[in-house]
Image (tube, rainbow, N blue to C red):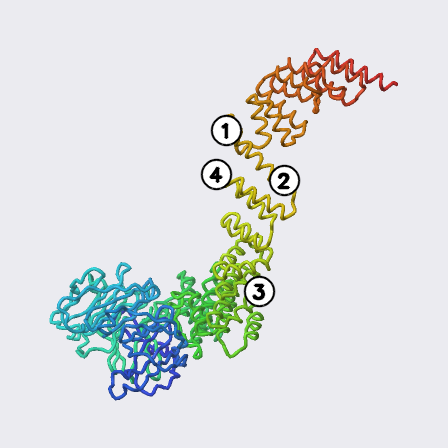
C-alpha cells in the first residue's frame, strides 16, 4: 500500500493529488512545444500542432505543416499549410479543428486533416486583423471570440449557427488587455478582461467594471486568468504573485494563495473533480508546475521539458515531447481504501480478499469485523467505485475481485452496479490502448455517454472496435452496429481508387438488409464525392422508393426517377417527379416522355383535369384522342355562362365525336344543343327559368305550368317514348292534384303503362276516391294488388279465389289483419282446401 500511495501529494489536510503517466509519446518532435501553436481537445481528445513561422522573420517564407496526433502521439493527419497566418487553434465539441487566421477567416478541418468549411468573423475583423482568439465550449455548442487590432471584441457563441456579436467598447482601452477569458453566465457568453488593475465584464449590451471581493491590495496588473471546466469558478494571477480564487460571478471569494512568484505563468487551469468540495488551480511556468488551493502549502512538480496543460472535467492532462500525464484529486473511495492505516470498510474488504487468496485465516477476521459493523454493502460499493477511478488494469482487477468476494456474503446485493462497472472498465481499457489513444477517465466517460464515444471512434475510423463495443454492450442495432456500418459505408464511397462496382458490391455484402441503414444516405454521400454512377448503383439496394426518387432527381436522373416512382405505386411520388420533369424539360420532350409511360400519362391527365385544363387539351390534341377531346369540350361547355359560348363548345365536341366515329355521342350532343336553343326560346316566351333543366324536367315543368300541348310537342320533337311521357304527365298532374285533367288524360287513349300506376299515384296523394276509379280499370293480373291498395280486401279475395292464384291468395291473407277480415280469411282457407282435394 505504501508503494501505491507514493505519488500521492497532500494539499492541506483533506485532499490528495496524484500524477500518473498515460502514455510515452510516440511523436518525434524536432522542436520544443513553445515553437508551435498547440490545441488539445478535452475528454482525451486529439492534439493539433502548427509550427509558427510567422513569428520569425527569417522563416517567414517556410510553409508550416499542420499535424494532428492522438493523445498517445500517434499521427492522424499531416498537411502543408497553404493559407494565411494563423493566430489560434482550437477544437470544437464535435472534434473539428478550428484555425483562426489573422484576417478573421476560420478554417474548419476534420480529424484526419480533411477540409470541411470556412467562415468569416466579419468585415471589421478583416480590416483590423486579429490580435488574439479563444475557442470555447458552452451548452449551445462551440464558440469563437476575437480580439481585433482596434482592441474590440467580436464573438459567436455557436460556430454551427454563426451569429456574430460585436461586444461593447472598453473605455480608454488603447492597447491589448494583459489577459482575458470567456465566462458563461445565465446561458450567455461574456468576456472578462484585465486592463492594468481594473477588470471589465462585457456582455451584449454594456461594459461594466467589476472588482473581485477580498482581493489583496497592491495589485497593479492581472497577468493570467482561468475559468473552471464548468464555468462556475474563476482564478486570477496578479503581478504580486497572488492567486485569487472565487466564483465566476465575482460575488464570492473561495480562497487566496501567494506563490511568491511574480513572473507571468505560461498557463493556469483549474483542477477539480465533480462534487468535490476542494478547489485547486494548476499553474505552469517554464520548468515548474504548482498546484494551489485553500491550504497554506502548495504541491510543486519539476518539469523536465516544455509542457502543455489541458483542463478536463476531473483533472488536468499534461503533455510534453516525451510523456503524457494526468493530474487529479484522488477520489474519496480510493483515498479511503488506500490511505495508510485506513480502517474503512473497503480497505478491510480488500485486505480480506488478499488474505483469502493466501489461504490465511485473517480473511475471516477482516470479514467478520466488517459484518459486525454492518458495513459490508458499503465496502463492496467502495471497491466497485474505486475500481472505476483506477487507470491500471491490475488494480482494477484487484478491487473488483475484492468486491466480488464481498458480494458472496450478502443475500440481496443487486449485481447491476458490479456488472456495469466491469463492462465500463473493459470499454475504457480498450479505448485507452496506446494505438487508440483516448485516455478517458470513468467520470469523463459517464459525462460523455457511450453514444458520443462511439461517434468519436467512428470519426477516427475505428469501425471494428466500435462494432465490438456495441456487440459487447448489446446496444440496439439502430443505435449501435447499424449506425456504425452506415458511417463505414459513407467512408468507403470516398475511396476513389476502387471501382464503383466493387465499392457497391462490398457495401451490399457488408450491410445487406441491416435494419436502420439507409442506402440513400450512403448514395447521397457518394454523389457529394462526385461519384454519380456509384450513387445510382447504391440506390438499387434501397428498398424505399420514397428515399430513392428525391436523390435521383437531385442527380438529374429524372427519367430513372420516374420509372422508380411508377414501380413503387405511390401516386404522390409520381406526381412529384412529373412536376419536376415539367419544369426541367421543354413541352415537347415532356409529352414524349409521358407517352412512353402510360401510367404516368394517366396520372398527369388526372392532375390536369383539376389544375391545368389547357394542358389536358394539348395532350389530347397531340395524341389525336378525339373521344377524350369531345368529352373535354362537353365539360368545358358547363363552365360557359353565355348560351352562345356553351353551344359553340358543344358544337366543337360534336365535331370531335364525329372524328372519333362515335355517332351516338355526336347525336346526343346535337340534341343537347337543340334543347338549349329551345329552352332559351321558352324562357323568352314564358318568362321563367328553363336553362340547365334536363329534357324530362323541361317536359314536367311545361305540364305543371299547364302547357300540355307544348309538352307533347317537345316529346314528339325529342322522340320521348309514350310510356315515359305518360309517367311524366301522370306524376305532374298528381302533384298539381288536377284530378279532372288526370281523368281526361287516362281516357284519351289506352294507357301504355296500364292503370295500376294511376292507383298508386292517387294513393300516394291520399286520394282513395280517385284511386277506386282506376282500380276497376286495372287488368286481371294486377287487379288484386289494385284492390288491396284501395283497401277492398273482400273483393280482392274473390278475384284471387276466382283466379286460383296461390301468390295472390297469400297476398290477400297478409292483408287480413282486423276482426272484420276474419270471414274473408276463412273463405280463402276453404278455397285452398277445396283446391287441394281436387
Q: Mark 1 falls on what kind of element?
A: helix
* Residue at the spot of label 1: 684
On the image, the x and y values in percent for residue 561 come to 54, 62
Q: Secondary structure at mark 2?
A: helix
Q: Name the residue beneath numbered marker 2.
A: 667
Picture quadrant where residue 178 is located? bottom left
Question: Up-down: is 615 above or below 646?
Answer: below
What's the distance in space between the residues labelled 1 and 4, CA to CA?
A: 17 Å
Query: Mark 2 and mark 4 in contact (Cβ < 8 Å)?
Result: no
The disc, 1 or 3, on the residue closer to the chain's N-terminal end is 3
Instruction: Give the mark nearer the N terminus: 1 vs 2.
Output: 2
Closer to the camera in the image, 37 or 87:
87
At 28% from the left edge and 87% from the top edge, which residue is drawn? 59
Q: What is the quadrant of the C terminus in the image? A: top right
Residue 36, compared with residue 161, is above or below; it is below
Q: Label 3 belongs to which residue? A: 513
Other residues around mark 3 within 10 Å, as few (<14) / some (14–19) / many (≥20): some
Q: Indicate which label's residue lies in the foreground, 4 or 2.
A: 2
Residue 294 in sight here: no
Amino acid at each position: 500500500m505504501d508503494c501505491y500511495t507514493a505519488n500521492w501529494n497532500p494539499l492541506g489536510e483533506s485532499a490528495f493529488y496524484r500524477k500518473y503517466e498515460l502514455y510515452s509519446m510516440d511523436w518525434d518532435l524536432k522542436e520544443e512545444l513553445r515553437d508551435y501553436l498547440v490545441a488539445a481537445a478535452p475528454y482525451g481528445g486529439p492534439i493539433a500542432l502548427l509550427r509558427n513561422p510567422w513569428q520569425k522573420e527569417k522563416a517567414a517564407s517556410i510553409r508550416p505543416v499542420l499535424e494532428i496526433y492522438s493523445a498517445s502521439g500517434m499521427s492522424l493527419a499531416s498537411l502543408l499549410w497553404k493559407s494565411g497566418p494563423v493566430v489560434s487553434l482550437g477544437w470544437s465539441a464535435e472534434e473539428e479543428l478550428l484555425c483562426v487566421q489573422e484576417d478573421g477567416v476560420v478554417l474548419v478541418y476534420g480529424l484526419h486533416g480533411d477540409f470541411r468549411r470556412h467562415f468569416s468573423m466579419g468585415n471589421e475583423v478583416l480590416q483590423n486583423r486579429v490580435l488574439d482568439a479563444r475557442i470555447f465550449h458552452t451548452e449551445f455548442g462551440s464558440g469563437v471570440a476575437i480580439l481585433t487590432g482596434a482592441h474590440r471584441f467580436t464573438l459567436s457563441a455557436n460556430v454551427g449557427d454563426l451569429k456574430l456579436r460585436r461586444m461593447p467598447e472598453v473605455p480608454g482601452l488603447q492597447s491589448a488587455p494583459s489577459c482575458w477569458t470567456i465566462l458563461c453566465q445565465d446561458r450567455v457568453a461574456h468576456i472578462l478582461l484585465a486592463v492594468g488593475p481594473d477588470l471589465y465584464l462585457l456582455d451584449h449590451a454594456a461594459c461594466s467594471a467589476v472588482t473581485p471581493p477580498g482581493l489583496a491590495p497592491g495589485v497593479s496588473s492581472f497577468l493570467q486568468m482561468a475559468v473552471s471546466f464548468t464555468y462556475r469558478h474563476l482564478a486570477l494571477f496578479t503581478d504580486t504573485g497572488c492567486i485569487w480564487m472565487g466564483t465566476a460571478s465575482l460575488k464570492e471569494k473561495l480562497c487566496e494563495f501567494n506563490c511568491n512568484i511574480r513572473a507571468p505563468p505560461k498557463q493556469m487551469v483549474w483542477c477539480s473533480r465533480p462534487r468535490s468540495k476542494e478547489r485547486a488551480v494548476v499553474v505552469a511556468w517554464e520548468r515548474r508546475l504548482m498546484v494551489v488551493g485553500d491550504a497554506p502549502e502548495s504541491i510543486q512538480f519539476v518539469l523536465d521539458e516544455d509542457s502543455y496543460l489541458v483542463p478536463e472535467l476531473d483533472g488536468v492532462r499534461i503533455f510534453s515531447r516525451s510523456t503524457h500525464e494526468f493530474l487529479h484529486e484522488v477520489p474519496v473511495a480510493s483515498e479511503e481504501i488506500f490511505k495508510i492505516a485506513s480502517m474503512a470498510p473497503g480497505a478491510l474488504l480488500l485486505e480480506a480478499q488478499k488474505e483469502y487468496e493466501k489461504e490465511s485465516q485473517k480473511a475471516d477476521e477482516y470479514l467478520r469485523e466488517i459484518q459486525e459493523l454492518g458495513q459490508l454493502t458499503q465496502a463492496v460499493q467502495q471497491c466497485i467505485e474505486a475500481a472505476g477511478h483506477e487507470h491500471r488494469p491490475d488494480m482494477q482487477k484487484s478491487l473488483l475481485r475484492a468486491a466480488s468476494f464481498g458480494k458472496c456474503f450478502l443475500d440481496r446485493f443487486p449485481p447491476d452496479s458490479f456488472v456495469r462497472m466491469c463492462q465500463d472498465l473493459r470499454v475504457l481499457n480498450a479505448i485507452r490502448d496506446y494505438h487508440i489513444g483516448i485516455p478517458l477517465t470513468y467520470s469523463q466517460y459517464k459525462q460523455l455517454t457511450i453514444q458520443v464515444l462511439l461517434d468519436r471512434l467512428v470519426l477516427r475510423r475505428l469501425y471494428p472496435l466500435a462494432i465490438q463495443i456495441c456487440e459487447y454492450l448489446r446496444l440496439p442495432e439502430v443505435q449501435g452496429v447499424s449506425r456504425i456500418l452506415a458511417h463505414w459505408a459513407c467512408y468507403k464511397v470516398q475511396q476513389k481508387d476502387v471501382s464503383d462496382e466493387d465499392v457497391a458490391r462490398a457495401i451490399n455484402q457488408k450491410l445487406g438488409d441491416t435494419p436502420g441503414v439507409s442506402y440513400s444516405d450512403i448514395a447521397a454521400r457518394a454523389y457529394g464525392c462526385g461519384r454519380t454512377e456509384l450513387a445510382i448503383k447504391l440506390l438499387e439496394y434501397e428498398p424505399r422508393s420514397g428515399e430513392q426518387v428525391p436523390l435521383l432527381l437531385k442527380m438529374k436522373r429524372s427519367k430513372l426517377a420516374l420509372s422508380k416512382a411508377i414501380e413503387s405505386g405511390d401516386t404522390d411520388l409520381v406526381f412529384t417527379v412529373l412536376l419536376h420533369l415539367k419544369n426541367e424539360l421543354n413541352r415537347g420532350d415532356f409529352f414524349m416522355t409521358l407517352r412512353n409511360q402510360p401510367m404516368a400519362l394517366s396520372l398527369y391527365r388526372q392532375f390536369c383535369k383539376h389544375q391545368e385544363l389547357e394542358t389536358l387539351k394539348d395532350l389530347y390534341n397531340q395524341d389525336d384522342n378525339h373521344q377524350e377531346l369531345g368529352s373535354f369540350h362537353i365539360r368545358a361547355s358547363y363552365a360557359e355562362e353565355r348560351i352562345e359560348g356553351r353551344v359553340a363548345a358543344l358544337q366543337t365536341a360534336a365535331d370531335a365525336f364525329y372524328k372519333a366515329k362515335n355517332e351516338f355521342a355526336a347525336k346526343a350532343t346535337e340534341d343537347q344543343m337543340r334543347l338549349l336553343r329551345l329552352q332559351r326560346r321558352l324562357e323568352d316566351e314564358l318568362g321563367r327559368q328553363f336553362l340547365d333543366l334536363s329534357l324530362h324536367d323541361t317536359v314536367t315543368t311545361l305540364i305543371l305550368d299547364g302547357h300540355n300541348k307544348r309538352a307533347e310537342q317537345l316529346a314528339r320533337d325529342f322522340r320521348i317514348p309514350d310510356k315515359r311521357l305518360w309517367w311524366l304527365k301522370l306524376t305532374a298532374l298528381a302533384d298539381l292534384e288536377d284530378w279532372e285533367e288526370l281523368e281526361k288524360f287516362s281516357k284519351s287513349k289506352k294507357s301504355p303503362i296500364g292503370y295500376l300506376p294511376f292507383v298508386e299515384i292517387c294513393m300516394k296523394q291520399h286520394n282513395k276516391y280517385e284511386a277506386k276509379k282506376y282500380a276497376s280499370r286495372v287488368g286481371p293480373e294486377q287487379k288484386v294488388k289494385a284492390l288491396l291498395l284501395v283497401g277492398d280486401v273482400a273483393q280482392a279475395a274473390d278475384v284471387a279465389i276466382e283466379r286460383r292464384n296461390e301468390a295472390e291468395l297469400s297476398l290477400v291473407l297478409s292483408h287480413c289483419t282486423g276482426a272484420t277480415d276474419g270471414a274473408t280469411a276463412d273463405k280463402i282457407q276453404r278455397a285452398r282446401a277445396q283446391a287441394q282435394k281436387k
